[in-house]
């Protein structure tokens, strides 16, 4: 039964990628090697809240698939997000929490947080010793709302959520060539604690190598 469920999950994932990215995207994601990423730790600090530069801002914290369905019934539009609604439901059922920002009812930004190994496995290939910590990921800002301080605002909401649950920090995985995200991590008081690579074959074989590091200089 477990094997059948895994095959069904992989088949669904492949169909979603094929629909959104075409055959080329499916091939690229099926056979993937990336040796340039860092693990960063960001403290869940209490900071002064600065509102984003937009009007009619709505914040929603989603902890279950049922809550997501309620937002859809209320008319909130997720069409600007790079994950499908079904993918979001799957992560929520695994125990992840979704922080969403809407302008009016149009999707503007999302950040995910996981405090369990099962939910964390949807985001990154962290080794087991990292899985005991809170993991953040899946951050995305709709193009028309970038540069308005929205993602930083959402990250502060996620930090508050983690502090209330006893976590002092969260881990995120950042590509080594993504200087913009690295700078935002640095501004939030984050530091690089590891670097590594991973290999994925046909969604099935996942091999991860990681090395803890004392420090790596920011760009």
Image (cartoon, grey):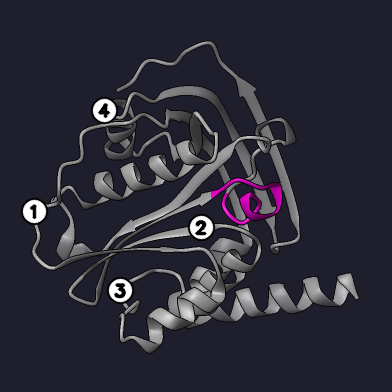
- 17 vs 91, nearest the viewer: 91
Q: Element at badge 3?
A: loop
Which mark is drawn over residue 97? Answer: 2
In the image, which is nearer the foreground, mark 4 or mark 2? 2
The residues tagged by marks 3 and 2 sit, at their Cα atoms, a distance apart of 19 Å
In the image, which is nearer the foreground, mark 4 or mark 1? 1
> Which residue position is annotated with label 4?
187
Q: Is residue 113 something one can see in this rendering?
A: yes
> Which residue position is annotated with label 1?
53
On-image quarter of the N terminus: bottom right
Q: Element at badge 1?
A: loop
Contact check, label 4 and label 3, Cβ < 8 Å: no
Residue 201 in the image: x percent, y percent? 70, 57
The span shown in magenta is 114-123
Q: Relative to 204, is 210 on the left or the right?
A: left
Sequence-earlier tag: 1 or 2: 1
Q: Relative to 215, is 29 on the left or the right?
A: right
Sequence-earlier tag: 4 or 3: 3
The residues tagged by marks 1 and 2 sit, at their Cα atoms, a distance apart of 25 Å
165 to 19, vertically: above or below: above
Residue 150 in the image: x percent, y percent? 21, 52
Sequence-earlier tag: 4 or 2: 2
On-image quarter of the C terminus: top left
> Which residue position is annotated with label 3?
80
| Residue 166 in magenta stretch | no
Counting labels gives 4
């Amino acid at each position: 039964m477990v094997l059948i469920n895994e095959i069904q999950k992989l088949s669904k994932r492949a169909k979603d990628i094929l629909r959104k990215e075409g055959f080329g995207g499916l091939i690229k994601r099926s056979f993937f090697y990336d040796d340039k990423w860092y693990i960063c730790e960001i403290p869940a600090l209490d900071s002064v809240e600065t509102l984003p530069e937009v009007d009619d801002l709505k914040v929603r914290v989603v902890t279950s698939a049922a809550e997501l369905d309620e937002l859809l019934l209320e008319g909130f539009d997720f069409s600007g997000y790079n994950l499908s609604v079904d993918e979001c439901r799957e992560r929520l059922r695994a125990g992840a929490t979704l922080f969403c920002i809407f302008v009016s009812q149009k999707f503007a930004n999302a950040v995910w947080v996981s405090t369990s190994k099962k939910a964390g496995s949807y985001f990154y290939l962290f080794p087991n010793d990292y899985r005991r910590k809170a993991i953040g990921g899946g951050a995305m800002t709709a193009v028309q709302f970038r540069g308005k301080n929205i993602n930083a605002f959402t990250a502060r909401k996620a930090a508050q959520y983690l502090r209330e649950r006893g976590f002092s920090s969260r881990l995120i995985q950042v590509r080594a060539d993504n200087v913009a995200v690295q700078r935002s991590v640095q501004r939030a008081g984050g530091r690089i604690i590891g670097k590594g690579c991973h290999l994925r074959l046909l969604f099935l074989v996942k091999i991860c190598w990681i090395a803890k590091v004392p420090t790596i200089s920011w760009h």
